[in-house]
Amino acid sequence: MILDFDPLVATVCEQPLTLKYQDDDRKRRQYTPDMLVTYSDEAAPILYEVKYREDLRENWHIMKPKFQAAIRYCKQQGWGFRIVTEREIRGTGLLNNARFLRAYRDLAEDSATATHLARTLAVLGETTPEILLTAAYANEEKRMCALSCLWQMIAIGRVHADLIRPLNMSSPIWITNGEGFLWLQSPLFYR
């Protein structure tokens, strides 16, 4: 879910491969890492394993040979290998923001409202949802209706926000210079 909202993620492949290795007792074993992620700003993909910290502590002797096999394989491929725990996943507001915004991704698009919000945001520059909606609509009912469109625009990356911090009506939001007008002309927006 978090990777869905990371703008630098190019591709995600769940359980991309199964590695064969020998454990410390020389028994043949198999290990399937959780995901392979390619980032748009990195040359090499990263193979990830997601584990609870407590599970790592209690079962490190069992997991270590698996991870060593993954590290060897990744070196051969020119990839990175990382273990991620609940601390990295839940340690920021990103997971809560992803859960919140996910519901807005598949809403029917309201192109007229989105166009108005984008143009207003382009004029205002960096602002907050509260200020944007107040500037865009004098009527409180219209502001409330436009709010779901704004959340959708953030969810699909048309409006930017720092999703590491908890998202609320006071969160900074922005459109990259010229972006507000460029995507408004795109036929992809009007599917």
Image (cartoon, grey):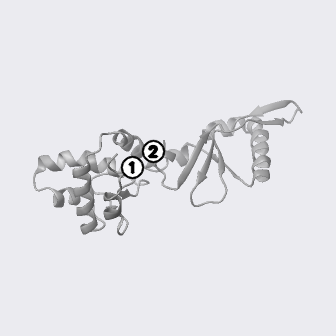
Circle 1/circle 2 CB separation < 8 Å = no
Q: Is residue 33 left or right of residue 3?
A: right
| Residue 20 shows in the view | yes
Position of residue 13 in the picture relative to residue 25 (left or right): left
At 78% from the left and 47% from the top, the residue drawn is 73
Residue 90 in the figure: left or right of residue 73: left
Please tell me whether residue 31 is drawn above or below residue 75 in the rendered image. Answer: above
Give x and y (percent) for residue 76.
80, 51
In the image, residue 43 sits, relative to residue 105, either above or below, namely: below
Q: As rendered, which of 71 and 86 lies closer to the eye?
A: 71
Residue 140 on image: x %, y % = 12, 50
Q: Nearer the viewer, residue 35 or 170?
A: 35
Categorize mark 1 by other alpha carbons within 10 Å: few (<14), some (14-19), many (20+). Answer: some
Counting residues from the start of the chain, the first of labels 1 and 2 encountered is 2
User: Which quadrant of the rendered structure holds the C terminus?
Assistant: top left
Q: Secondary structure at mark 2?
A: helix
Regarding mark 1 in the picture, which secondary structure is present there? loop
The quadrant where residue 127 appears: bottom left
Q: Residues within 10 Å of mark 2 (few under 14, many from 20)?
A: many
Q: Could you give the CA–CA distance between mark 1 and mark 2, rounded to whole angstroms?
A: 16 Å
Q: Nearer the viewer, residue 116 or 19?
A: 116
Q: Residue furthest front?
A: 187
* Residue ID for mark 2: 95
* Residue 138 in picture, x, y percent from top left: 10, 56
Residue 136 found in image quarter: bottom left
**Camera-nearest residue between 74 and 190:** 190
Q: Label 1 amino acid?
A: Ile
Q: Residue at x 37, y 42 (%)?
A: 105
Numbered tag placed on residue 156 in the rendering:
1
What is the residue that sits farthest to the right in this orientation? Answer: 26
